[in-house]
Amino acid sequence: MPQEAADVETVAENDQGVRFARGRAVGLRNLEWSPHRRERKARLSSFRLAGRVTCLLRVGVTMSTRPPMRPPGNAPAVPLGFQPALALTGALCLRQNLGSSSPGKKQNKENTITINCVTFPHPDTMPEQQLLKPTEWSYCDYFWADKKDPQGNGTMAGFELLLQKQLKGKQMQKEMSEFIRERIKIEEEYAKNLAKLSQNSLAAQEEGSLGEAWAQVKKSLADEAEVHLKFSAKLHSEVEKPLMNFRENFKKDMKKCEHHITDLRKQLASRHAAVEKARKALTERQRDLEIKTQQLEIKLSNKTEEDIKKARRKSTQAGDDLMRCVDLYNQAQSKWFEEMVTTTLELERLEAERVEMIRQHLCQYTQLRHETDMFNQSTVEPVDQLLRKVDPAKDRELWVREHKTGNIRPVDMEI
């Protein structure tokens, strides 16, 4: 082919590549993945929480760095007649921006860090984040990271810690109700023994005002037994039963929450794995395109420009696949984020409700106990009154009047 014709064809090809690159750039902007922007804007996810709309700040994945005009490594600069950076349409800069992969932790060198498949702002460049519920120490603000499991070498999700607290709270509530049940048994047994003792015939032969006081002591036992029976019945209906019935399906509801959040976290991990796979594929496609381009430029291969165009298309497709995987990952993380906030706030509400409910019923317990003491006091008051009336002289008079045998005293015998 004449040199002039080759030059014309090259220019046409370059022009087509530039137009194709511009078209791809428009697609990138539509996907919010512009390689020429310093960072992506934070997204606001709005949804209704607890009867009101709460705006939640979402931190987006950030892309940076302009596309290089020189292939990585020690490869020679590519002449202006052919520019792989334009042919890749931003795919090369995607590889550089997303950084290298590692099993447990990956970093975007400037803006983000990924830990256990969750993306966080990088500590060195982290923008200031306002708490969702400042000054409240809310669950939704402090349980996003995973924590090392004290029972093993793995990690435990923050939500799992909250779930364990809820289940422990339910167990404590059950044990409290069992404690009250034991108290009820003691009261019933005590009342039974008091009633039995009140029927005892010991000292029944005592007479006079002291006898009346003693009889009242025994009667007060029967009255006190009735008081304790009523106290145990109220403890069952007003304290023990509500403690047992409160959130009867609590454990079942917690299991539903756990499975839902766990499924979302698994989906997030799956999407993250897809991103890594697409990242690796992009790297391989880029490497293939760069090698073929260099071989063509230095005439080390018989590769035609058709092969270059094919490699370019594959590289571009790999870049598209990576962007699609990242977008799906971000969607999964956003859904997990929103469900985490919603569910943790619900757990927070349930915990506050549980504590308040127990507090109210324990207050009812103390009130019943005070009433029992007052009723017991009322059974003792008649005893006190009769004891104050005990008069040995009067008792002697009454006894003498009833049992006297004669008031004539003996005299000496006369001879």
Image: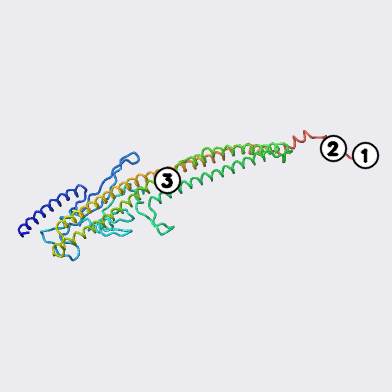
Assign a secondary structure to mark 2. Answer: loop
Assign a secondary structure to mark 1. Answer: loop
Q: Residue at x 53, y 37 (%)?
A: 237
- Mark found first going from the N terminus, 3 or 1: 3
> Residue 25, position in %: x, y?
17, 50
User: Which residue in the structure is indicated by mark 2?
Assistant: 409
User: How many numbered marks have been drawn onto this rendered protein structure?
Assistant: 3
User: Which residue in the structure is indicated by mark 3?
Assistant: 255
- The answer to which of 410 and 88 lies nearer the viewer is 88
- How crowded pointer 2 is (Cα within 10 Å; few <14, some 14-19, many 20+) is rated as few
User: Which residue in the structure is indicated by mark 1?
Assistant: 414
Q: Label 2 to label 1, Cα distance in Å?
A: 15 Å
Q: Is residue 138 visible?
A: no
Q: Residue at x 40, y 51 (%)?
A: 160
- Taking the image as shown, residue 15 lies to the left or right of residue 247, namely left
Q: Residue furthest top?
A: 402
Identity of the amino acid at label 2?
Answer: Arg
Residue 378's tag is none
Q: Is residue 259 visible?
A: yes
Q: Quadrant of the N terminus?
A: bottom left
